[in-house]
Structure formats: C-alpha cells, structure tokens
Image: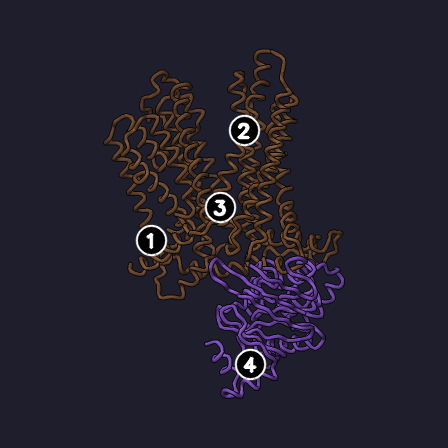
Chain colours: A brown, B purple
Amino acid sequence: MRKFFHIVTFKNRMFWKVTFSRSAQSVIKNTGSFIVYGSFAIGAFFFSRFLTAYLLENVRIGLFLFHRFMSMLFFVFFVTINLGNMVVSFSTLYRSPEVNFMLTKPVPHLTIFIIKFLDNFFYSSGTLFLAGFSVLLGYGSYFGFPWHFYVFVMFGVLVPFMFLAGCTAVIILLGLMKLASKVNFKTLVAALVIFYIAQIYFYFDVSSPIHLVREVMRYYPNVDLYLGQLDPPVSKYMPNFWISQIFFFYIAGNHGTVVGYFSLLLLSTAAAFIALVVVGDRLFYSTWLTSLSFKSFSIKNFELTGNIFSFRSRSRLSPQTESLLKREYWQFFRDPSQWIHLLVMLFLVGIFLSSVTSMDFGLQDPKLRTAVYLVVYIFDAFLITSIALRFAFPMMSLEGDAYWTIRSSPIRPSKVYWTKFFVVLWPLFILGLTLAVLSNYPYILLPPLPQVATVEMALIAVSLVSLNFGLGSYFANYDEKNPIRIASSQGATLTFLLSIVLLVLLVGVFFFPILAVFNSIYFQIPRKDSWLYDALAIVGVFSAFVAAVAHSVGVRALRRDI
Amino acid sequence: MITLKNLTKKFGSFTAVDDLSLAVPEGEFFGFLGPNGAGKTTTIKMMTGLFTPTSGSIVINGYDVQKNPLEAKSTFGYIPDQPFLYDKLTGREFLFYIGGLFNMPKEECRREIEQLIEHFEIGDWVDKRTEEYSQGMRQRITITAAFLHNPRTIIIDEPMVGLDPRSARIVKDSLKTKSKEGVSIFMSTHSLEMVEELCDRIGIIKEGRLIFLDSRENLHHHKSKYDGRLESVFLELTK
C-alpha cells in the first residue's frame, strides 16, 4: 500500500501542477473551461427541471412512468460509461509508456493495475459525472429535496453507479484480452460490438416503452402509484432499475425500500471492485504480455498495396499534397482503432436513418410537430458533432512526435492545415447532407422546408467540423498517440460542449420558421416561407463566423514551438 | 552556409540561448558541443523552424529562416535527436513522403531512394512498418531522409544514438564525403571522439553562451595545455 500511495501522491502532484499552472495560457484555458463547463451544467440543470415539470404537469405521465423513463436513461448512461471505460482502459493499461516504465520497477502488477484503472476512471468519467449530477440536481430541485439529498445522490448513488460501470468494463476487457491469446482479435472486437448492440436492442425490446406507456395509461389518473407488476422480471437485476427505484421511493417517502436498493447498489459496486482486483491480479500482467503480439498481428492483416494511394504511384496533385493525402490514408486505414470505430459509428447512423425515414408520427398539433422535427434535426447535428469530435478533433494531434518532419520541411503550415481539414470535411459534409435529406423525407411534400433544411445542415456540418478541427489544432497534444484519448481530453470535452451549444443555437434559429410552416398547414393560413430563408441567412452568417474563428485559432496554433 | 546572429531564445524568465553568433561556411564540418541543458538542441530547433527565436537572426544558404522559411528549409536536411517516424508507414513510404514534402519529382525521388537504400544498407527491412523498428533502424531512416533531396546544409542533433558500429561508420563516412563535396554540416553531439575525428571547427556552448570557438588544428594547442585529451579541455571549459 505504501507504493500505491507513493505513486498516487506524485501523480496527483503532477496533475495539479499541469492543470493549474500559473502561465497566462493556462489561466485563460482554465477560465474558459470553467465558463463552458459551468454554462453546460447550468443549462443541463434548467433543462432537466423544465422537462420534469413538463412531463409531470403538462403531459401528466405520472411518477411511475417518469421513473421508468429515468431507468432507461440510466441504462444508456451505464452503457456509455461502460464502453468509454473499456475503450480508454485498453490504451491506459496496454499501450501506456507509464505502464511500461512502472513494470520495470519493483512495483507489484496489481498496484500498477489499480492505479491505472482509477486514473482511467476519473479521466473518462468526469464529464459524464458533471452531466449526470446537473440533471439530477434539476430533477431534485423540482421536487424541492433538502440539501442532504444531493450529497446522497452524488456519493451514494452516482459515484457507486458509475464505478460499477467502470469496474465491469475493465473486467470484460481483461477477459477479452485473455481470450485474445487464443481467438482472433478481430473476431473478438466484432463479437463485442455485436454483444453491445444486441444488449441495447434486447433491453429496449424487453422494456418496450410504447407497451409500458399503454399499460400505465390504463390506470389513469392513478399514474403516480407504484405499478411494479408492469416491470419485466429481468430489469430488477439491473443497476439502472435500482437507481430509479431509489428515487421513486424517496419521493414516496418509503425510506426502508430506499435503503434496501441503496445497499444493493453499494454491495454490487463493492463486489464488482473486489472481482476487478482478483481478476486484475490474475490476468493483468499475462494479458499485457499478450498485447505485445497484437502489433505484428495487425501488420499482417491490414497491409494493402498496389492502389492509387501507394506512394510509388504517380499523381496529378502537387508532390506535397500527394504526400500528405497518402500519409493520412495509410495512417488511418492501417490503424484498427480508427476504422473499426468509424464502422461502428456509421452502423449506428445507419440504424438511426432507417428508423427516421420509416417513421410515421401522424401528428397534427403544430407545436408537437415542430418539436419532433427539431429533435430529429438536432439529433442529425449531434451525430455529426460526435463523429467530428472523434475524427476531426484528434487529426492534428495524431501528427504526433513525427510532426518535426513537417515543421522542418519547406511546406507552409497552413497548407498542411487545410489539406487535413478537407480530408475530414468531405466525408462529414456528405454524411450531413445524407442525414438531412433522409430525415426530411417525411416532409418531402412541404417545399421549401426539406431543401432549406438540407442547406442548413450542410452549413452546420461545415461549422461543426471547422470548430472541432480548429480547436483540435489549438489543443493539439503531440505526445498522445491514442485518438480515443485525444477525443476525450479536457480540450475535446470543452470543444464538445461548445459544439452542443452551437448546434442548439443553429437549429434553434429555425424554431419559429418551422412552427410557421406547421401552423399554416394546421390552421390553413398562407405560409411565410421567407422566414425560412431569413433563418438560413442567419445560420450561414453565424456558421461562417464560427468557422473563421476556429480556423484562425487552429492555423496560428501550428506555428507554436514544438 | 549558416550564419547565426545575436540569436536568443527565452522560455519565460529562463534564457536557453543567449546572444549566440557564429558562422559555418560552405563545406565546413562544424561540431557543436556542450553539457546537458546548455542550449544545443534549442539552437538547432530554432535553425530548423521548430522554435521561434526570441531575438536575433538565422540565415541558411542565403535565406533568413524567419523571413523566408520555405526557401531556407528546402536547402537543408535535418536529423533530430529523437528519430520519430509515422508508425503506420514503412521506411520506404516515409522516404517517399519526405521527398514529396521537398517537392521532389516522383522519378527523381524513386531513384534517390533506391541509391540511398543501397548506400545505407537498409534494404532488408525498409519495407516493414516503422512501428517495428529499433531505435537504430529509425535513426538510419531519418539520416537517409535528410540526404534525400541533396541538401546544401545538414543539421544534425546527436547522430549516433542507437547506431551499431557498422552503421555508425557508414554515417560518419557519408557525412565526411558530403562535407568534402561542399555541404556544410552543423552537428551537435556529446561524442568527443567523433568531433575530433570529423569536425573542422568546434564550438562549445554553456548556459546558452558560446564559450569556445576554434578550429581542430588550434584545438591541439589547447589540448597540450592539459593532458592532451579533448575531454580535459571540455571538462575544464564547462565546469
């Protein structure tokens, strides 16, 4: 334990020194982060409070259904933390120079494992914790809970819940790494992806929200009652269900049941941590050794030769552009963590598109139609944001230590910047257009709405990719090789929050013009299409401004000392 | 031809390079010595465009590195102290990539690469990905890359790190040959033997300031004041 605390003390010291350095740049960065994080937390708080009030007072779904929806959200939250921890743990446990260094010192493997696990957990869960806690604060404030409720939620509910998700993620990872010595690694990754998709599908199939709403509404107006007989039996074993039960029975004043579920959550978390320690003790070092053989494996399997991207092939492009493009191509497609992640994201986009295009809402109320339209539209933009964060943000950092080749060569940094930007822009631009066209398919008979919405999405795609790429260049970390870690760094989180604010603003501009379209249909009054064009002009100007600022910051950052 | 004039680099209140002035004429092999943290790598990073000087100027082959960076960079080759490469490229692809950055026509690039692969004896593994390379193999690739566009100046930061004796010999001979052909070479190193063997002139930097600058011939005179060894001169000057 002495070694554990010795290492943790030094890591802690280093963290505070790096994070809160007194340099002007650091102060500006931290102030900016504080403002963005703070604004995000306040926004999430009010949004959650408003939504709670809206669902319980206007839509009157009742406390039972409300907490079942909460349970579903916590399920998604659990899976997100779980997957995030698994992906980041792979790099922190098996690809980290720090682990290599510590393994050469007389430090027990288990100590290294636990330190890196905790390091990883706090690194990858901070933003999610902030989001989750802000939402629960909004929820609690609606019910007027006392201050100790929030302390209880933070330390008694949210932290154990997230820790449980983190522990199970790393146990699964260690199991996978153990299997990887016997089974093809690609097959394992594919199996894992299928497992998670199947898990999500199975959960929503079993908990069937539509069926649940129908069943609960049979009891209307007594929908605040506990209707536990409607819960599928399997859900009772899930931590997200326990949390929703804790909140439901807290409101109902049934503190005995609250304590019961709270104990269940704590015991499960403790059991998961003990299991993690046991499994880590047995498997960490042996799987670390196994991971060393992955490099040569991937080399044999992803070698591609004799195509237009071969460096030997001639090209009509200038030698510099050709070199940069070919290098980007090979760096991306020879790195499984890049293209596998891209495939998974495109698969999810595909699922989303297939559901949106075949959706018949059958709604009449103009406000509701506007809300549904904008929710789908925001989700389109959110998908672009997520992909931009994952692929555009890390692009400059991925130059890595080899960036000296560019800085010492006769090539303008701005040329490198723009070449890389267009490499990442065009696929996301096409994706944005595809999303806009397909999600506007149900509105095809309402021109010019689909056309204007498509152009707007193109503008949003450009501004979001610009923002992520520009700030990715500004926050470039050439020491980090893992794109997933780069995309979950502090700078990336800040960029993500800014992107969310930006996309809400850009889509929000369309609220009244779209409401006017649906009002005109419902009330059979003349349409005001000019409003759509006005909104489009505002989005165009704002997008251009955001893109210009992001690029200006990004290009300048390339001239910094390295 | 390299001219450094009143070159200074500050990091906050710390002065890494302090009013450094020196000139390396065409065809000269210049050895740049100094203890750890003396400012050698900082000087080289300013010369190659990786750092911006706080003040002063650097002119390489007639081009000011700050005012005409592209022209200046096209005339020199750089071998860094750490041979970082793009992991997913093969050694040969890396060389083509560097050739492209230097705007070399494809045919010329291919021809030069073939010749250099043979010259530096890297053909056995040049088509493997660089993530598989040892430190020495990576170093040999960066040295090969620096020779690729036939530079008029070569700037080297610790060239022998990780090289086996045979590779070290090839590199030394190649550098000496280049120097005789008129290429100016600016080499930072800790290897006093190498300096004695190769360099025409030597500069010693300490705490950012040039404290010694003389030719190899005159160095023998300085050595004779001590015990006849360059090491003793170096230790005395830098203590």
Give the residue pinned by disc 2: A376
Give the residue pinned by disc 1: A277
Q: Are marks 4 and 1 in contact (CB under 8 Å)?
A: no
Amino acid type at image mark 4: Glu
Q: Judge if badges 4 and 1 mark residues of a common chain.
A: no
Label 4 neighbour load within 10 Å: few <14, some 14-19, many 20+: few
A405 or B155, nearer to the observer = B155
Q: Judge if badges 3 and 2 mark residues of a common chain.
A: yes
Image location of residue A30, percent across then percent down: 44, 45
What is the distance, in whole Å, between disc 4 and disc 3 at their CAs? 47 Å
Give the residue pinned by disc 4: B193
Amino acid type at image mark 1: Val
Front position among marks 4 and 2: 4
Image location of residue A288, percent across then percent down: 44, 59
What is the distance, in whole Å, between disc 3 and disc 2 at their CAs? 28 Å
Image location of residue A31, percent across then percent down: 44, 43
User: Is residue A310 visible in this depiction of the protein?
Assistant: yes
Label 2 neighbour load within 10 Å: few <14, some 14-19, many 20+: some
Identify the residue at image location x=72%, y=58%.
B103
Q: Which mark is first along the chain, 1 or 3?
A: 1
The answer to whether residue B50 is above or below residue A147 is below
The answer to whether residue A513 is above or below residue A477 is above
Q: Residue B69, located in which quarter of the rendered image?
A: bottom right
Q: Residue A349, located in which quarter of the rendered image?
A: top right
Give the residue pinned by disc 3: A491
Amino acid type at image mark 3: Gly
What is the distance, in whole Å, between disc 4 and disc 1 at their CAs? 53 Å
Amino acid type at image mark 2: Val
